[in-house]
């Protein structure tokens, strides 16, 4: 496999500032999607009114993870992100395994979002008199995503920033309305008290809550395109985690306040999909409910576009080192984006959408669990490996770090991520929608993906030593 010359493979340098990277990350996270899509389910299937506390705990765990992540990030600049971290900390075979897992996980979550946006957009269009199958809507979205992702990274950052600000604006209006009106039981702090948070359902709640943070780690993917990456990438990562935690914890608490802690469970059981719309209509008016409905669709579009950018850069990084087709390492002559990798991703999505349409697959009960379950498991597994990679990377040379940064924080985050992996495997039925063979097949399939990556790297080490030596290179080595 021929690796293209450096002249044809460069991403746009010094293109992204601090807030552009934050916009990319928050857009990938999709706060409105997480609030509308996760909170009610976590209340019903998890720790009840203690969900806001679960968000705070998850945020604290990811802040601890970030300590080692950004400390190592000062020395790792590679669009492959987790792949480069694990390769340099634990060795190339595990690094390649993490790349395979991350690509499958991000691709699965992206396709799950195609199912969601297809369903919600098709429902909205039907209300306006235009009846289209969800997968046809998905094809139109895929074409737009390809168009946007091929444009330069600055354009993408500004566009995603606008969508993110619109999302946060409606969330802030909702929060302000609850603060102004109060709740039937006052501003109860019960959802944050240990006796309501630390209950047996907390483990099940984490299955959903952890997925709501997915995407904050993509700051590292833009290190090659960032201005002053040694400063902007760490700052963007901390800002992203803090903003995500604050938004999810505060808004979910205020939703519970608006119904009353003693009434929220009954309301969620009656209409889990309508909680936010009901309160928005009651406290502010129909316009806010309609705005949330529209911005939920744009939020999903932002998530899909962000994952397209993430995936294309992963393929770019792997192709540059001979692990993927060489064409994926070529960038657009003007926009300097990995557009050929993007076209391949779009072609795959279009094929899957057509197959789903022909097979009559339901976007909510089939596409969503089949995409999101492997994603949650894969990303947590890779984050666990990354935590160990930080320890391995600094073991021989502590460099600028202290004991907390190079050992204690990554060790704690590894334990937390490993527990998260176990919780997801044990509660897989919550993600797949019930008891089925998928609850066993999905963990086994993700294990197989990781083993395939490891096996591929070991094969290269034995039979293609020169290509193996290129794996996990940093930017100044490319």
Image: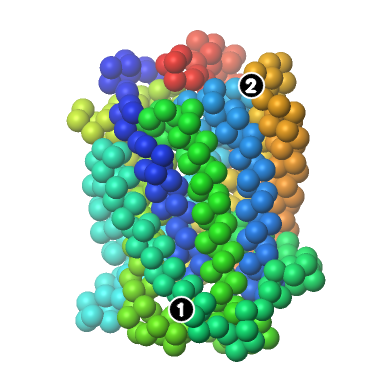
Check the image and name the residue furthest to the top: 466
Q: Secondary structure at mark 2?
A: loop
Q: Nearer the viewer, residue 280 or 188?
A: 188
From what the image shows, is residue 102 above or below residue 264?
A: above
* Circle 2 residue: 400
Residue in front for this viewpoint, 219 or 336: 219
Q: Look at the image and tell me whether residue 441 can be seen.
A: no
Q: Residues within 10 Å of mark 2 (few under 14, many from 20)?
A: few
Q: Is residue 336 left or right of residue 273?
A: left
Residue closest to the far left:
334
Per the image, the residue denoted by label 1 is 177
Q: Nearer the viewer, residue 18 or 202?
A: 18
Residue that appears at 71% across and 75% down:
190
Residue 331 visible within the image: yes
Q: Quadrant of residue 264?
A: bottom right
Residue drawn at point x = 38 percent, y = 30 percent: 227
Position of 272 compared to 51: left or right? left
In the foreground, 401 or 262: 401
Q: Earlier in the sequence, mark 2 or mark 1?
A: 1
Q: Secondary structure at mark 1?
A: helix
């Amino acid at each position: 496999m021929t690796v293209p010359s450096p002249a044809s493979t460069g991403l746009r340098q010094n293109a992204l500032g601090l807030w552009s990277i934050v916009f990319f990350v928050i857009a990938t996270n999709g706060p409105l999607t997480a609030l509308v899509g996760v909170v009610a389910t976590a209340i019903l299937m998890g720790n009840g009114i203690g969900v806001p506390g679960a968000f705070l705990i998850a945020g604290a765990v990811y802040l601890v993870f970030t300590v080692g992540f950004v400390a190592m990030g000062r020395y790792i600049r590679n669009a492959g992100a987790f792949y480069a971290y694990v390769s340099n900390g634990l060795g190339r075979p595990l690094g390649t395994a993490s790349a395979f897992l991350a690509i499958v996980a991000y691709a699965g979550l992206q396709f799950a979002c195609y199912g969601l946006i297809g369903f919600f957009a098709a429902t909205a269009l039907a209300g306006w008199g235009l009846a289209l199958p969800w997968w046809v809507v998905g094809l139109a979205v895929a074409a737009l995503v390809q168009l946007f992702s091929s444009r330069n990274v600055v354009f993408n950052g500004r566009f995603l920033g606008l969508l993110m600000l619109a999302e946060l604006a409606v969330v802030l209006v909702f929060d302000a309305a609850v603060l102004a009106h109060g709740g039937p039981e006052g501003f109860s702090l019960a959802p944050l008290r240990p006796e309501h948070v630390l209950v047996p359902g907390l483990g099940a709640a984490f299955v959903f809550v952890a997925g709501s943070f997915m995407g904050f780690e993509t700051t590292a993917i833009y290190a090659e395109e960032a201005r002053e990456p040694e400063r902007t990438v760490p700052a963007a990562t901390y800002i992203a985690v803090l903003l995500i935690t604050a938004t999810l914890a505060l808004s979910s608490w205020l939703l519970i306040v608006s119904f009353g802690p003693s009434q929220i469970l009954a309301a969620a059981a009656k209409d889990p999909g309508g909680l936010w719309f009901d309160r928005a209509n009651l406290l502010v008016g129909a316009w806010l409910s309609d705005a949330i409905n529209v911005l939920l669709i744009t939020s999903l579009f932002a998530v899909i576009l962000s994952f397209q950018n993430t995936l294309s850069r992963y393929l770019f990084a792997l192709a540059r080192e001979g692990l993927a087709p060489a064409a994926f390492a070529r960038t657009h002559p003007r926009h300097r984006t990995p557009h050929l990798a993007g076209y391949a991703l779009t072609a795959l999505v279009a094929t899957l959408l057509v197959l789903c349409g022909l097979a009559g697959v339901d976007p909510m009960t089939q596409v969503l669990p089949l995409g999101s379950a492997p994603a949650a498991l894969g990303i947590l597994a890779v984050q666990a490996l990354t935590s160990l990679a930080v320890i391995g990377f600094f073991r021989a040379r502590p460099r600028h770090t202290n004991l907390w940064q190079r050992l204690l924080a990554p060790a704690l985050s590894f334990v937390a991520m490993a527990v998260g992996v176990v919780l997801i495997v044990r509660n897989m039925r919550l993600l797949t929608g019930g008891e089925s063979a998928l609850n066993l097949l999905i963990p086994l399939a993700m294990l197989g993906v990781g083993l395939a990556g490891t096996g591929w790297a070991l094969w290269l080490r034995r039979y293609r030593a020169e290509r193996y030596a290129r794996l996990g290179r940093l930017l100044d080595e490319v």
